[in-house]
């Protein structure tokens, strides 16, 4: 790749990523202004990511603009670290999300999930008291469970619904409990459960309790996290390819900058 072409491409790529970094930082600041603890917990990672992208972009942009071999070396080293980190994270994400799947229940269009089906990493994270306390507070604030009665106004519609993993695990007792359905957010708990499943005794109709302390709820969250992680992992693969191309162009720019310096000498 020619000297002018590689420098031009690197300058514009890093100029665009600088704009992206600024947008990420603004988004992080916007998140910090919300009182929702669920969003606030993501503020620092988002701000850190934006700042990191901005610093690397500045180094790459100035390196290509000034044809500085030192700056381009620093840029390539940081980019290489990012590539390795993305690759490691993606491999781990696929390994961690390899286990776990739903179980079909007769008469229902959605699946139920069991916590022990998932990887030990998910079990460790979800069984941690502090982690689950924070996640549970987010689930309660989301109002997903309380909105089911508004979405499905008849028992027939409720039973034919395709509930999400979190709705299936956190908003209702497991099917093997055998509690009769009164409506989408209320069950007849006077019925003696036919199962020894401990979740049967943990479920309450109270909007702040529901089945948020149940293993079935943790399993629903694990399934949700598994799906999200898979999406992120696939995105990371695409990002890895794009960054590898940018790394190649950066190598060309660094080599051309070195040649320019040697010719001047």
Image: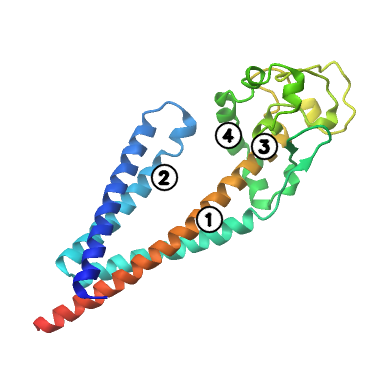
Front residue of 48 and 222 = 222
Please tell me how crowded label 3 is: few (under 14), some (14-19), or many (20+) other residues with Cα within 10 Å: many
How far apart marks 2 and 3 lie (CA) works out to: 26 Å
**Contact between labelled residues 2 and 4, with CB atoms less than 8 Å apart:** no
What is the x, y in percent for residue 206?
68, 17
Pointer 4 or 2: first along the chain: 2
For residue 45, the mark is 2
Could you give the CA–CA distance between mark 1 and mark 3, rounded to whole angstroms?
A: 21 Å
Disc 2 residue crowd, few under 14, some 14–19, many 20+, Cα 10 Å? few
Residue 165, disc = 3
Between the residue at mark 4 and the residue at mark 3, the CA separation in whole angstroms equals 15 Å
The answer to the question of whether label 2 and label 3 lie on touching residues, with beta carbons closer than 8 A, is: no
N-terminal-most mark, 1 or 2: 2
The answer to whether residue 20 is left or right of residue 66 is right
Q: Position of residue 49 (x, y in %)?
A: 37, 49
Between tags 1 and 2, which lies in front? 1
> For the residue labelled by badge 1, is the local secondary structure a helix, a strand or a loop?
helix
At horizontal 83% and vertical 23% (from top left) the residue drawn is 179
Q: Which residue is mark 1?
A: 234
Of the two numbered discs 2 and 3 on the same chain, state the one appearing first in sequence: 2
């Amino acid at each position: 790749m020619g000297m002018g072409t590689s420098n031009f491409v690197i300058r514009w790529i890093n100029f665009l990523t600088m704009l992206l970094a600024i947008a990420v930082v603004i988004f992080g600041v916007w998140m910090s202004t919300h009182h929702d603890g669920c969003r606030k917990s993501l503020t620092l990672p988002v701000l850190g990511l934006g700042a990191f992208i901005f610093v690397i972009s500045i180094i790459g942009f100035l390196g290509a603009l000034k044809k500085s071999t030192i700056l381009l070396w620093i840029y390539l080293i940081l980019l290489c670290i990012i590539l390795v980190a993305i690759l490691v994270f993606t491999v781990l994400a696929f390994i961690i999300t390899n286990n776990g799947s739903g179980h079909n229940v007769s008469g229902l269009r959605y699946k139920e999930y069991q916590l022990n089906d998932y990887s030990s990493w998910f079990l460790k994270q979800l069984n941690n008291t502090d982690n689950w306390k924070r996640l549970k507070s987010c689930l309660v604030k989301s109002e997903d469970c309380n909105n089911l009665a508004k979405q499905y106004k008849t028992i027939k519609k409720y039973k034919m619904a395709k509930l999400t993993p979190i709705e299936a695990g956190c908003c209702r007792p497991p099917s093997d409990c055998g509690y009769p359905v009164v409506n989408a957010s209320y069950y007849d708990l006077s019925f003696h459960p036919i199962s020894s499943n401990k979740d049967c005794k943990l479920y309450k109709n109270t909007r702040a309790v529901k089945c948020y302390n149940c293993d079935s709820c943790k399993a629903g969250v694990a399934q949700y996290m598994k799906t999200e992680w898979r999406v992120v992992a696939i995105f990371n693969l695409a990002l890895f390819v794009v960054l590898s191309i940018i790394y190649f162009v950066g190598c060309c720019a660094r080599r051309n900058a070195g040649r320019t310096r040697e010719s001047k000498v």
